[in-house]
Image: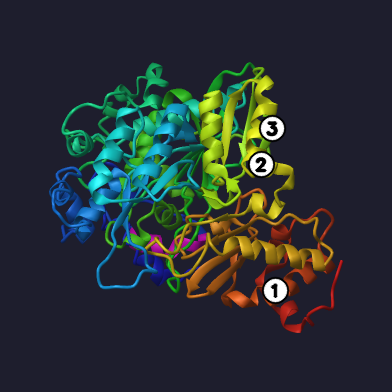
Amino acid sequence: MRFAPVAIVSLGVISSSLAFSPSSAFLASTRGLHAESRDVSRLSMVLEEPKKKKLAKIEQLKVESDHLIQPLKDQLKTEEIGVSKDAYQILKYHGSYQQTNREKRGKTKDYQFMLRLKQPAGELPPELYRLIDDLSAKHGQGDLRATTRQCFQIHGILKGNLKTVISSIMNIGSSTVGACGDVNRNVMTTPAPFATPEYQQARKWSKAFAHLFRPMSPAFSEIWLDGEKAASVETWSKEVDDLNIDEAMTYDSGRGIILPDSVEPIYGDRYLPRKFKIGVTAPGDNSIDIYTNDIGLVVICDESGELEGFNVMVGGGMGRTHNKENTFARAADHLGFVPKEDIFEVMKSILASQRDHGNRDVRANARMKYLVHTLGIDNFRSLVESYFGKKIQPWRETAEWKYNDWMGWWEQGDGKLFYGQHVENGRVKDEGDFRLKTALRVLVDRYNLSMIMSPTQSIIFRDIDPKDKDGIDAVLREHGIKPIEEVDPLNRLSMACPALPLCGLAQTEAERLMPSYLERVRALLDKMNVGEEEVLIRMTGCPNGCARPYMAELAFVGDGPKSYQVWLGGSPVLTRTAFPYMAKMKVDDLETTLEPLLAMYIEKRQQFEAFGDFCHRVGAEALEQYANAYTLGSVKA
């Protein structure tokens, strides 16, 4: 996509600075920006500190919240079944969204709450799974939802039960803190629990970065634990004690990273302009959609397996708004290589760059991807270096990216096995003969297994004794769970967000419609004799991109009741964004829309060329011209 300069000028990168830091002087002298933003960035660069102006409402709310305490604390004490709009905004930082069933009619809202866990690296010990399984049954709607960022959500919690649920989770050594809100969200990593140095380091450092950027406010213990400390320290923090993270967090180089805020020395009282996402992986493993993160890190080890440092990328993000071309999905750029001894300070420098120069005036343009896009990667790198105080080394060449969902049985490399269980659209439930939720509880109770949440809304059991393999398979079959070999590849590759009826942003269906859509795509592929093709398909009920649709080979993005945008051309290894092909496709027009695209693919593809790569190569114009001239039913492989 290309965007008019006037649209980018409106980002106001500098005018929304949190504070005038030493790095502000850097912005006055930047030149030679990349082509798409060269003209506009010159307009944005100023030497003087911008004039103070009235804060945006959400920014003022954060300042007045006393570090995320009010008005939430008072609102939780009322007899109302919901909380006020302002309290709801603060509640997000505590890991919860206020929702209502949009399909129920009536003047009175039936407010309920979704609670999202924070699980760095997606890890879930057996005692935690038992707890959330019990909580979902007693205080939720009876199911669990695996997310696309490796954590569980519990839906249907009533306001009066929130404190019981959250305190129980905190006291067992887990958390919901920062699972939502304008802070660093759940840190992702490759879910494959291989016993190799790269995979071990990826797991460890994802927890380290989660601990580095955790909110420090006492709000969480004050509201949910009555000011007491949790009965158990967060499990992941104990695993990175040797890295001295608290010392690294508060270290002040004098270059504007650390703020004069005794509670939140990194975030300050306004926290970040918008949510912030980090992913860590091993070379070549793109199971986490690494290019969609604000910061993506690739572990680099030497030949002996010793950690040398990280390749770092910046500026990815999915969210956009329909009919607003100054909002867009973006794949991250390569920033460079950072030695392990410098990585904490560089991470702080990147976050400070976004904190101080990200757009706080227009939330639709507040993600760091817009700052990177406007400055260009070279000037953004210089901005980061102005905080860091040293040059960032060039990106190191590493293994080519591959995608794997890590489902089925695998050897870990330490004598143990791991098993990936596909979960359709992340919904862990019992329904008729399909009793996935009960099966998972049986496995956890019988074998005391730890879980790892996958980035594709599925679950991995790790550290399995090989002698237990047959017993685990038997439990799954007894509960109506198909072996992975019987799951259609289209279903394995697909993702959909929850959307209706609970999501307040959904414009149409996603999770509930996706299974039937996949059946229809399967029937069309078989009819055209290309049933062996595996196409990565994603669906969302709105343009915000929770299921990362803009990276898919084929995506359906809800734009109204029973209507979708069609996006094409993402990479099967998830390294580039797709392009918009059709502005509106009615639900019933799926086959007539896809058949011409598949026909052109059959006739003009190169050997071994994937559907997404083909669409990317030929482009939207050629696809549209072919489709306009195509006669339905005229082409088969």
Q: Nearer the viewer, residue 532 or 471?
A: 471
Q: Is residue 337 visible?
A: yes
Which residue is depicted at the point 70% across and 71% down? Answer: 594
Look at the image and give the residue range highlighted in magenta.
35-44
Query: Tag 2: Cα neighbours inside 10 Å, few (<14), some, or many (≥20)?
Result: few
Q: Would residue 373 be counted in the magenta stretch? A: no
**x then y, percent, for residue 173:** 35, 27
Query: Tag 3: Cα neighbours inside 10 Å, few (<14), some, or many (≥20)?
Result: some
Q: Quadrant of residue 415?
A: top right
Residue for badge 3: 409
Q: Would residue 38 be counted in the magenta stretch? A: yes
Q: Nearer the viewer, residue 505 or 427?
A: 427
Q: Is residue 39 left or right of residue 274?
A: right
Front label number (2 vs 1): 1
Residue for badge 1: 591
Dots 2, 1 in contact, CB < 8 A: no
Q: Quadrant of residue 10?
A: bottom left
- Name the amino acid type tagged 1: Glu
What is the distance, in whole Å, between disc 2 and disc 1 at their CAs?
28 Å
- Name the amino acid type tagged 2: Asn
